[in-house]
Amino acid sequence: FALHAVYFFDEKRGWAVGDAGTILGTEDGGKTWTTRHQGAKQLAALAIHASHKTAPVDALAHLGGAEGHLTASLCVTSPDPRAVAWGRTLDARRYAAAMRQAGAMTGETLWHFPLPQFLEGSDKKAILAYWNEQYHKESAAEELIRQLVLTLRIHRPLVVLGEHPRSKQALGSLVGEAIEEAVRRAADPKAFPEQIDELGLAPWQVRLVVAEPSGPSQAKTTAFDNEQASQRLQMSIRDFASLAQGLLA
């Protein structure tokens, strides 16, 4: 899980702390680290979505807040640092706080795929062309899959809540297609072997991918009443989620 802070007592001894109660310790100045404490080693569910606007806050409030499952969320795009509006520089921190408010363990934002506001309504070709030209030297699609595979192998979720590959929104469809391919490759030991050989990760097979239907569908669906009061939350799931939505807005 992600680490958030490091503190050294002296030149040799130090600690690093992160999500899920993770505490690492070193006695050799950071050359090697050992796990001192870890509260969890995998997620029940991981939400992967295109932007803050499509964060599945109600679903996270239901699974994490009301039912107590260990969940986390990943936002694929971030504000473009070269064209960012004033006040958006803290979007990643605000997003993480919102996901925790909704009941998730954390919310992470990929910095690899900045998206200026003028491209939010563009088609997939234009979005990929921008990432290829500005950041990834014609390999944006593959880099997106690489980062999603890395996230899946780190968090090891049983279920992925994702964008639909046939979403009416081009960005959502792009991310949905990448999620499908990343889930397939995360289980393949030959895919991105450096994650296994150098980072010590292992292939991971996601059990289920859930995406909101983009239109009429014959697929099996499950509905939850988010207006019903939750004994655990002492309010409805929708009201609980609105606190997180307020942070995102």
Image: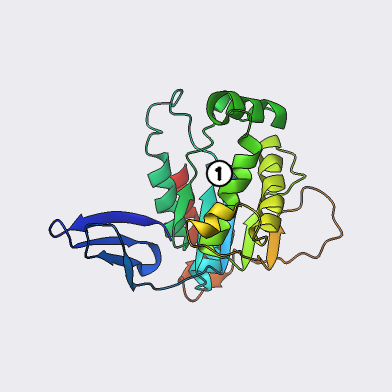
Residue 157 in view (yes/no): yes
Q: Picture coordinates of residue 247 (x, y %)?
A: 42, 47
- Name which quarter of the figure residue 208 lies in: bottom right
Q: Residue at x 63, y 29 (%)?
A: 138
Q: Nearer the viewer, residue 62 or 152?
A: 152
Quadrant in the picture for residue 14? bottom left
Task: Give the side of residue 103 with respect to residue 216, left or right.
Answer: left
Give percent across and percent down for residue 130.
Answer: 60, 25
Q: Residue tagged by mark 1?
A: 76
Kind of element beneath mark 1: loop
Q: Amino acid at mark 1?
A: Val
Estimate the x, y position of residue 132 in percent, counting from the top left: 61, 28
Q: Nearer the viewer, residue 174 or 150?
A: 150
- Residue at image x 63%, y 46%? 145
Q: Nearer the viewer, residue 201 or 95?
A: 201
Callout 1: few (<14), some (14-19), or many (20+) C-alpha neighbours within 10 Å? Answer: many
